[in-house]
Image (spheres, rainbow, N blue to C red):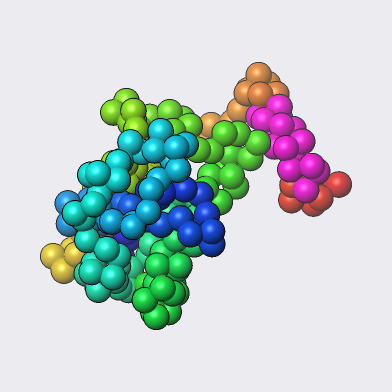
Amino acid sequence: MRQIFLDTETTGLSAANGDRMIEIGCVELINRKLTRNNKHFYLNPERESHEDALKVHGITSEFLKDKPKFAEIVDELLDYCAGAEIIIHNAPFDLSFLNKELELIGKPSFKGFVASVTDTLVMAKEIYPGKRNSLDALCDRLGVDNSGRTLHGALLDAELLADMYINLTRGQDALLIDIGAGQNADGSEIQVDLSAFKLDVLLANDQETAAHEDVLNQIDKASKGKTVWRAVSG
């Protein structure tokens, strides 16, 4: 499975109102392994960054003036992303800029070139309802070192996103690590028959049960009473 973690920096917040991309960072993951086959572009947006955007990324127009325009790197970017699952944090924002740039040069929307797009912000909100789910907040929650992120940068943020995603989704891998799971010579995953293992069942004590119920009540409150287990048990 090939996954590409993608992030952009822009001159402002609205592609529809003329803001443009100034940086694209991509990090490749194959079978949950980082390959170091990454892509990184700085782009000349042919306009100034808004003051607030400049405070976020620190990338000046002077630095960007000799960088390529999007049309000059688009084929390399699309070839790199072709057929992969693209993973973005707050995907509608980045997609709006990618699609606008593609529209300006007469190409179809970005999703037409890739297998799928996954939004980790949506994933995080489902796992941690009612919590802060920015990239920084998730890195802190999941033990990803983001201490070097004083300014936003597309490649750095894509790398942090990849690390965060691995930690966010690693629950199902933890058991297989202990029983020697790995890959066949062709790169496919070794299938493990778990029926051969006897797992001890540890029942929660009263304190743990109460703490669990408290968490469920918080989730139920955050979802405004729309939790499935309440509907079933009710």
Q: Kindly indicate the quadrant of the structure image that contains residue 84.
A: bottom left
**Which residue is rendered at x = 39% and y = 80% of the image?**
106
Quadrant of the image occupied by residue 144: top left
In the rendered view, does 140 fall on the left or right side of 188? Answer: right
Residue drawn at (30%, 41%) of the image? 60
- Where residue 57 appears, x then y in whole percent? 36, 38
Residue found farthest to the left: 185
Quarter of the picture containing the N terminus is bottom left
Using the image as rendered, state which of residue 216 and residue 201 is in the foreground: 216
Q: Position of residue 52 (x, y in %)?
A: 47, 36
Q: Nearer the viewer, residue 41 or 173?
A: 41
Does residue 200 appear anywhere in the picture?
A: no
User: Magenta span has 218?
Assistant: yes
Look at 38% across and 29% down and name the residue there: 143
Q: Residue at x 43, y 28 (%)?
A: 140
Q: How many marks?
A: 0
Residue 156 in view here: yes
Q: Is residue 128 above or below residue 70?
A: above
Q: Position of residue 191 (x, y in %)?
A: 31, 62
Q: Residue furthest right?
A: 234
Q: Nearer the viewer, residue 119 or 55?
A: 55
Q: Is residue 203 above or below residue 48?
A: above
Q: Does 191 appear above or below 146?
A: below
Q: Is residue 34 left or right of residue 10?
A: left
Residue 38 shown in magenta: no
Q: Is residue 201 above or below residue 234?
A: above
The furthest residue to the top: 207
Q: Which residues are magenta?
A: 212-226
